[in-house]
Amino acid sequence: MSETNSTLALFFYIPFCRTICTYCDFNVYAHLGRLFDVYVDALTREVQTIAREIPPPRRAHSLALGGGTPSVLPTALLAKILESAHAHFEIIDGAEISLEANPGTLDADKLRGLRQLGINRLSLGVQTFDDARLRAFNRDHNAAESREAFGLARRAGFDNINLDLLFGLPDQSLSDWEETLERALAWQPEHLSLYGLQVEEGTALARQIARGRVNELDTDLAAEMFTLADEKLGAAGFLHYEISNYARPGFRSRHNSTYWRNEPYLGFGAGAHSYLNGTRYENVRAPAEYITRSTRGESVIAAREEISRETEIAETLMLGLRLAEGISYSSFEARLGLDVRAIFGDTLEELQTWGLIQSNSERMWLTLRGRLLSNQVLWRFFPDEERLKVER
């Protein structure tokens, strides 16, 4: 890895969970508590190794512990990770330090300990308030534990809490979803992440649907749920600032915004990704292999990709369009030396005709319908060698 003049986002991937959700296709593993200590040792060694390869100043504006379920780790191990970050990077004043947590892994003592470590943003994987659906998804908590965890987090001093919620669930009605939103709003969180359930190949949920044990998802109804959420949360004072994310003023996720702006970040841990100075890196996925390589002093990087100019153009555009403010023509040109309208003029005109994109003299952005159909919109900007013949 080479020199960077930018502030970085640091991501620490914890691949451990108590149980595996039926819909999950992430790089996660259950019943591996015996690896917790040696995994954190390997992770902190990686932090030290990578930091040595980047000349100072190594400044970070955000730290995030994700997974998986980082909150399954004992507080002492989480402290070790954060101490390593502070030892090898300059964490700027006011940095966002966030942790993903399952409500069933939290109690008052743990939450107080997390807050004392300097964690200032908590993301609770609530998913739904329906206990039957939580059991069906193999979630390791119930609705009462979600409510208790939220209250305990407030008392521990957390004033920036996100709730993760799923919609478009099997047999979920529009009124079910409305009730979910109302319950979430009653708690007065600062941030909400709303994800339409996806059936990923190879998951338990995909097998259940294929065998007829679970009904197919209703995509038309999920679209109505998306629209309903936009209306209700907007009326409650939330800004729909990214396709799946809503925040009260001042509470956008700074860490995740790094990804959407296609800015540099470093990922540590099994299966983690990094993006720095035009190169993308991916670590080995299996925790045991990650630990073994680290212990032997070998590189934990499994693959690296030099990002072509064409790919950078397309990814900057596709990621930026996920944000409510969309793409600023001047910022795009300052970064890449190109007028996006000159490259994708025909595509943009077509998308505007269909009501999927709006624009003015300064920027372009997705309409609500465009956000709803974002996958169908964004794929149109994938690199095309013939269209993207730009100056090298």
Image (cartoon, rainbow, N blue to C red):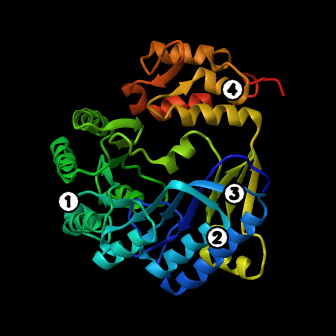
Q: Relative to 184, is 200 on the left or the right? A: right
Give how far across and how far down residue 188 sits, in percent.
23, 50
Q: Amino acid at mark 3?
A: Arg
- State the image quarter where residue 343 is shown: top right
Q: Badge 2 is on which residue?
A: 87
Residue 192 in view of the camera: yes
Residue 216 visible in the current orientation: no
Quote the CA–CA distance across marks 2 and 1: 43 Å
Query: Mark on residue 58?
Result: 3
Point out residue 23 in the picture as x, y percentages from the top left corner. 40, 59
Q: Are marks 2 and 1 in contact (CB under 8 Å)?
A: no
* CA gap, disc 4 and disc 3: 24 Å
**Image-based side of 137 in relation to 370, left or right:** left
Amino acid carrying label 1: it is Asp
**For discs 1 and 3, the disc positioned in front in the rendered view:** 3
- Residue receiving disc 4: 334
